[in-house]
Image: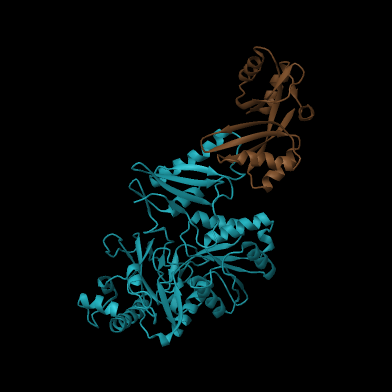
Chain colours: A brown, B cyan
Amino acid sequence: MRVEQISIFLENKSGRLAEVTRILADAGVNIRSLSLADTTDFGVLRLIVDQTDRAQQVLKANGFTGGKTDVLAVAVPDRPGGLAKILGMLDGAGINVEYMYAFVQRSGDNAIMIFRVDGLDKAIQTLTEGGVRVLKGEELYAL
Amino acid sequence: MIWDDEYETLPREAMEALQLKRLRAMVDRVCSTVPFYKRKLGEMGYKPGDLRKLDDLSHLPFTTKDDLRDNYPFGLFAVPMERVVRIHASSGTTGKPTVVGYTRRDVDTWAELMARTLSCGGTSSRDIVHNAYGYGLFTGGLGAHYGAEKIGAAVIPMSGGNTKRQILIMKDFGSTILLSTPSYALNLAEVMAEEGVSPAALRLKCGLFGAEPWSEGMRREIERQLKIDALDIYGLSEVIGPGVASECIEVKQGLHVFEDHFIPEIIDPATGKTLPHGEAGELVFTTLTKEAFPVLRYRTRDISRLIPTPCSCGRTLLRMERISGRTDDMLIIRGVNVFPSQIESVLMEIEGVEPHYQLIVTRDGTLDVLEVQVEINESVFTDAIKGLEKLAKRVEHDIKDLLGVSCKARLVEPKTIQRSEGKAKRVIDKRTV
């Protein structure tokens, strides 16, 4: 039920993001989704790709520093209140959402959101029991 | 291991008697052979024989870096050129280089002192000494070289730079003792990690590091990364080069000053007043045995303290604390005095922070702004922004807390701070006076 996400430290300098995408393109890695969080000095680029290990390896070889984190991919009904309900369930279970962003592809009638939470297993359990679909890594990459 | 078990373990009274005898001879000699000293000592009414006790030294005039420059190149030599066998010069980053000379006996003395230094790190004739101090006008390379040969060790005269080749040679030749600046030792360790060379593939056991101020935290880091004992050694070309003082591997607390050749003093840099043992101030050295280039009360601009308590290694020599800064690399940030080495000490206490840092000083209107650049690495990286911001805040907080100066910490990508090939460049001061 977990999805691997890689994250990379980027200084706020022109061309760094282009550099990351070029390295991944040269390695034949396909970016499935990404989110960039930034401050005035630096940013953290979070990526979901089709070959996590390969992406990590080529980025490291090119001098980038980062890490791998498990996140959740949740099918969110694409209608008013769809996301609110899911966030309400997590909040009710005392689970803190560190950050979230939307996945590019849809799954049927659902939008897919990526969640980074502080209690992964509990979140999976809470959502599944509440009838919310949490996607497996393979499902996500195959979309 | 004590190289000279007579002079390095002299009882205090015997040492002081020897120092007084040598000091009198030295002062009388420069008074008659070096016009600069003749004039200076003459101005204060000094006459041969006036020096009755060691304390009288504190009444004699100082020699400064400016005096050396004013007498460029050979004005302070105390012997005719026919007796000089070697000339070295400082890098001279500001103005002209300072030039020093050696007679044959000076070169022998120097080798003897470097043999003592290397012995402080346990070097014997069975060792292979990897000498990465620069060879050339800089005193580091040749000074260490002669000392290692005197011991009978096999010296590899590497000099600085070409880091990958240094590692290959350390590995293939089985170097056991490393001589370099501390910042270059870290550079070597880092490139080793990149090249996949583990410390276990080397036979290094001890490193003797000098020529720039460094911290206890940096020592721990070098010892951890290279799996060696790291010792602090001290010297400067104006006094002789490396071989003025050295830590012992047994205790690693303070550097033994080779007092039978040099008298150390600590003074208040503002007033010039001699300070008692234990107080921090500027280090001043008087050479006792140098022939070609004797110096009287040379102001080093290095900040230290003298430790009079005996050391358990058996040496009776006075110890000096590791250099905590230089009076001339002291930064004044909004009126607060800060040394780069103090910032290094703070950074090294924060887990996961790399020993690579740079300080950028700018002026915003009338306000000084200090930026501390710290490299990020995998062990401190987190995908959550607030985690990284917390690290930056911690750096800012600890520096403010311990040094009393506000700064901005900037996290930068790995390997973006220039690596040392010799002396590390820690400060970029963009303020215009």
Nearer-the-camera pick, B354 or B317: B354
Q: Is residue B249 left or right of residue B18?
A: right
| Residue A54 visible somewhere in the drawing | yes
**Where residue B102 sits in the image (x, y, percent)?**
43, 80
Q: Residue B144 in the image: x percent, y percent?
A: 52, 73
Please tell me whether residue B200 is drawn above or below residue B148 in the rendered image: above
The correct choice, above or below, for B422 with respect to B334 in the image is below
At 37% across and 84% down in the image, what residue appears? B79
In the displayed structure, does residue A5 sit left or right of residue B273? Answer: right
Please give left or right for residue B250 compared with residue B196 in the image: left
Q: Quadrant of the C terminus of chain A?
A: top right
Q: Quadrant of the N terminus of chain A?
A: top right
Is B146 or B230 nearer to us in this picture?
Answer: B146
- The image position of residue B149, as x and y in percent, is 56, 79
How many numbered dots are placed on residues in this image? 0
Image position of B308 with respect to A24: above or below: below
Question: Is residue B18 found left or right of A10 in the rendered image?
Answer: left
